[in-house]
Amino acid sequence: MERNTKSIFALFSIMKYSFIKSSTEWKMCPPPDKPEVAFIGRSNVGKSSLINALLKSKDAAKTSGTPGKTQVINHFLIEEQWYMVDLPGYGYARVSKVERVKWEKMVKNYLLNRKNLVCLMVLIDSRIPPQQSDLDFLAFAGKNGIPFAIIFTKADKQSPAKTQQNIQLFKAKMLQNWEELPKMIITSAQSGLGREDVLAVILEGLEEFENNQE
Ligand SMILES: Nc1nc2c(ncn2[C@@H]2O[C@H](COP(=O)(O)OP(=O)(O)O)[C@@H](O)[C@H]2O)c(=O)[nH]1
Ligand SMILES: [Mg+2]
């Protein structure tokens, strides 16, 4: 109980974090003895920026203008209690087929095998209409029972009305194949919008993991 209370306070203020390792396959990841939350999305969606915003750090995860480079699974240890995982992006057009197949194998094996994964955050750019690569990836997650939430990014870049419009389009697309919609959070790494909502979802996952350990 004491641990829980401590983690709640830590989550909403500045979190202590350290980079643990980069892994090229799921078997090389740290032992699954702590709960972990992973982040994924199309290259350039704002994944590194969101991770930095959550950690209130400028450079925990490197933000970059040249997408599609990182093909590793990055583990950060947060508050000595849980892992935050930065997964390589998908749907980058200028990547070779060989690279794409490598990505599929690495990421999908990670998602299908990582026992301590409590929530996958799937990032979607709030500025653009539904993209097939996002819908395909969500279909994969759903079919395989991977727990996930959708995080819409870069909301500061347009009016709230425009954001809502894209989200409605996205929901309509999803409802063609899904009976119910997952949790969805609107965020901006720039303004901090949605930060606490994302952290609340993380906290739920961490608590669930703890309860299942007992
Ligand atoms: N205005 C704005 N720009 C963002 C936001 N998130 C990311 N960006 C920008 O989008 C680009 C890609 O971001 P990055 O975090 O590197 O994306 P990643 O490839 O998904 O890790 C960078 O130029 C960021 O500065 C946001 O919330 N608001
Ligand atoms: Mg990145």
Image (tube, rainbow, N blue to C red):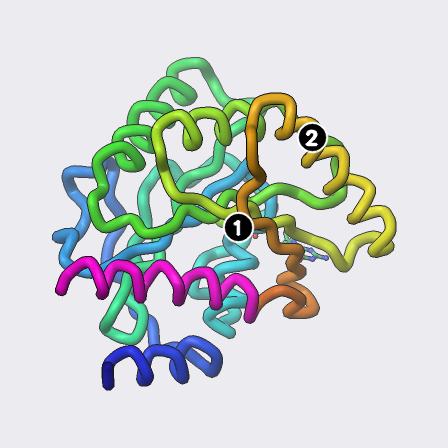
- Quadrant into which the C terminus falls: bottom left
Q: What stretch is highlighted in magenta?
A: 196-214
- Report the residue at 35% width, 28% height from top: 144
Task: Tell me the SS state at disc 2.
Answer: loop
Question: Does 167 sit left or right of 210 as displayed?
Answer: right
Could you tell me residue 16's position as x and y percent?
Answer: 35, 78
Closest to the observer: 151 or 191?
151
- Quadrant into which the N terminus falls: bottom left
Q: Examine the rendered structure and indicate whether residue 213 appears above or below residue 29.
A: below
As for residue 132 lying within the magenta part, the answer is no
Task: Tell me the SS state at disc 1.
Answer: helix
Q: Which of marks 1 and 2 is nearer the N terminus?
A: 1
Q: Does the residue labelled 1 lie within 8 Å of ligand 1?
A: yes
Q: Is the magenta stretch mostly helix, strand or loop?
A: helix
As for residue 209 lying within the magenta part, the answer is yes
Amino acid, disc 2? Pro
- Report the residue at 24% width, 85% height from top: 2
Tag count: 2
Give the residue at mark 1. Answer: 47
Give the residue at mark 2. Answer: 130
Amino acid, disc 1? Lys
Q: How crowded is mark 2: few (under 14 residues within 10 Å), some or many (20 or more)?
A: many
Q: How far apart are marks 1 and 2 (CA)?
A: 18 Å
